[in-house]
Amino acid sequence: MPDLDLSPSPHDVRLFFPTREADLWTESSFLSQSSPYFKTLLSSEFTETVSVPAKRPRTRRNSSPASSPADADANDFEDSDDETDNLYFKAHPPFQHERDELQHPYKEVKITKTAFTTYRAVLAYLRTGYIAFAPLSCTFSADVNADAPTRASRIEATVSSDPSLPYPVSPKSTFRLAHLLELEELHHLCLANLSKQLTINGAPHELFSDTSVCYDSWRKVILDFVVDNCDAVTASKAWQEMEGKVERDEVQGAAPIMLELFKRKPVKAGASALPVPSLLAHPHRFNAGSDLLTNSVIPLVRLLVRDPVRLQLVPVRLAFPFPRSSAPFTDDFSHNTA
């Protein structure tokens, strides 16, 4: 892909990534036509028009961007595309994107919650319809030998085969950005890629990821896989690891996920659905063949019942709302205070 998005001319919008001292350039008309979110954002107070000549203040490398009300409440997700950014800037040092003088006015949007490579891949997708997804981090076990391929080596191999293409990016990171920018088609592409990449050992980690906790559609794909492959998933080492973290209350937002699994796991013929209080009082009435119910849900519910603020029991079913998946308007942007 030509590096047109790295050049200020003839663009009038600068996406500035302060932690990398890097920028991407595009046109306001293109962004407004492509994304309802950008259409609103570019007409709001969360972008600043910079007049000419525009002298960019030098930012000390590795310094953190100043916090502002515009993104102070945004979620901080674990982002595997931060690793992709490291690979990109190793090959393309940030100083290539530094410019002391810009000779035309432009609007600046500061990006602090999304990786540079994710944004660049999404902008390329909006222009060309092409996007390449990187492997999910959960598909690479920490127990493999040193000679086994890593996520980074897979990405580097893809880039070396065709340097003109954008770097492959995480479907999870892209999904979050597509959700924010209201890009429905890209949203569905990310979900389809997630479905293809899920494995028996990877699904437990994805199920309890921060993205799964926050986004209903992402979580549903993983829940479908876990329910369809329940015996294999719950017998895996990864499930046992995550189950231990859940019981130790180390996974924020795990409770509603486990409770939805409880509701979705079918009970074998002849058994009837039971209120949770009855199950706690008579755990032997569970179907012994259901590993998911007997080994996971009961210990979790017992754990959470001790904390009535986090779990509200009603006579017949559990009431525990999921976090809403709608991101706040300022999820990824902050007002430029320079």
Image: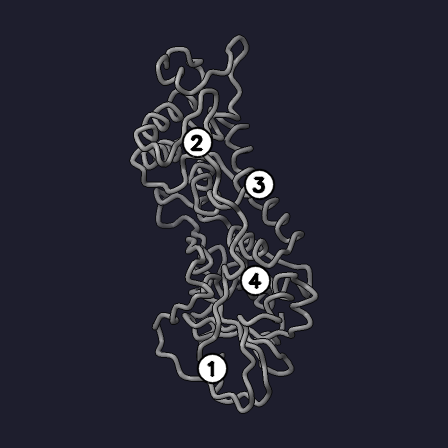
Asked if the residue at tag 1 contacts the one at tag 3, i.e. Cβ–Cβ closer than 8 Å, the answer is no
Circle 4 or circle 1, nearest the eye: 1
Type of amino acid under label 1: Glu
CA gap, disc 2 and disc 1: 48 Å
Res. 112 image quadrant = bottom left
Q: What is the number of the mark on residue 258?
A: 2
Asked if residue 46 lies left or right of residue 306, the reply is right
Q: Return the residue nearer the eye: 92 or 221.
A: 221
CA gap, disc 3 and disc 1: 39 Å
Q: What is the number of the mark on residue 34?
A: none
- First along the sequence among labels 2 and 3: 3
Instruction: Report the residue at 41% width, 62% height from top.
Output: 72
Residue count near mark 3 (Cα–Cα under 10 Å), binned few <14, some 14–19, many ≥20: some
Type of amino acid under label 3: Ser
Where disc 3 sits, the SS reads: helix
Type of amino acid under label 2: Met
Where disc 1 sits, the SS reads: loop
CA gap, disc 4 and disc 3: 26 Å
Circle 4 or circle 3, nearest the eye: 3
Q: What is the number of the mark on residue 195?
A: 3
